[in-house]
Amino acid sequence: MESQGMVDWELAARIGARAAGPGPVVSAAEADEAVAELRDGANRSTGLVAEFTGLEAAWGEAPVLVVDRAGWVRANADSFARVIDPLASRLTDGKPTPSGIVKAVGSRVTAAEVGGLLGFLGGKVLGQFDPFHEPAGRLLLVAPNVVHVERELRADPHDFRLWVCLHEETHRVQFTAVPWMRQHLFSLMDQVVGAVQPDTMVADVVSRASQLVRATRGTDGERGGSLLELIGSPEQRALIDQVTGVMSLLEGHADVVMDGVGPEVIGSVASIRSKFNARRGGTGTLDRLLRRLLGLDAKMAQYRDGAAFVRTVIDQVGMEGFNAVWADPSHLPTKDEIHAPATWVARVHG
């Protein structure tokens, strides 16, 4: 992990790991059992997902890793670097190079901010497909967080772990069974970075961020989207809409798969889904603020909107007809089509 540039990524990972904390108290035997069960659940889910969706993941690609919170933070520091470093280069292009001392101090201050964010998220994420890891991505399952949530929900541990694995394994299948998906996502992100105006001022970003803070507290009528959407140009917003369409599809598809497969293999799936949905909506002020600033509020909507799109299309044209979505990037739904599935069906199937 590089430590030069706008962010000292090594420092960010260390700060994030400390901020995330170790997680719930478990015995060595309980920890070993959770790790083993998550690995087995991921392996078992591969066949279940393939049978339900008709998508065959490439064997030997995108490994499955069961990690602790610090492991997730380090993995995502690498991923953040893939996004932020090109953006930093874009914003500083043609500007005077700061002195070594100024650059070092600045990179450490930014590392503290990024590390704090990673630590916050590292204590909450259950699992994640990391598309940035070479050569084909990797699936991360965060054992302490899975144990924490299953205890909080008073869910059957064996059922809950398999339920989480079904969702996350669907993402691994999406990226390995659809060979162009990973590069397509990278291309969209590169285009977003390329559309950033080099003269964007920090003061403008801070001003716009304050609008979001006031909106989150309910003291401002402005109900804009994420920070990225507020500072984005029209070109960026169009690209962000493309990314939103893709992510809504991927998240919604994973939710449909876990709900479709779940009743066949998970006895308490209905109870788990009900409790988990209630938990998604029960965030506090800090959660709401961070979600709003980063666009994570939109992610919650992506589960709902994407799942509704997938279910509607399957009802209309069947699973085989829905799978046309994976044939080519041009078949991906737009943000508008996510909300109007019939328009996607008409465009793709005629």
Image: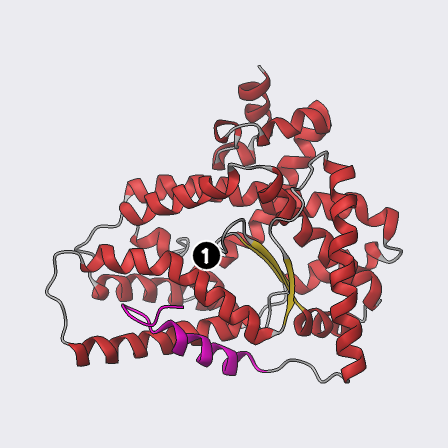
10 Å crowding of disc 1: few (<14), some (14-19), many (20+)? some
Camera-side residue of 193 and 34: 34
Task: Look at label 1 and name its amino acid.
Answer: Gly
Residue drawn at the location 71% of the way across and 85% of the way down = 25
195 horizontally vs 61: left or right: left
327 horizontally vs 10: left or right: right
Whether residue 304 can be seen here: no
Residue 94, by quadrant, is bottom left
Is 10 inside the magenta-drawn segment? yes
Residue drawn at the location 74% of the way across and 43% of the way down = 49
33 horizontally vs 202: left or right: right
Residue 340 to residue 131: above or below: above
Residue drawn at the location 63% of the way across and 55% of the way down = 63
Residue 47 to residue 2: above or below: above
Residue 86 in picture, x, y percent from top left: 30, 55
Residue 56 in picture, x, y percent from top left: 69, 38
Boundaries of the magenta span: 1-21
Residue 222 to residue 289: above or below: above
Structure colour scheme: secondary structure
Residue 106 to residue 201: above or below: below
Residue 174 in picture, x, y percent from top left: 61, 42
User: In the structure shown, which secondary structural element does the residue marked by tag 1 occupy?
Assistant: loop
* Quarter of the rendering occupied by the C terminus: top right
For label 1, the residue is 295
Whether residue 175 can be seen here: yes
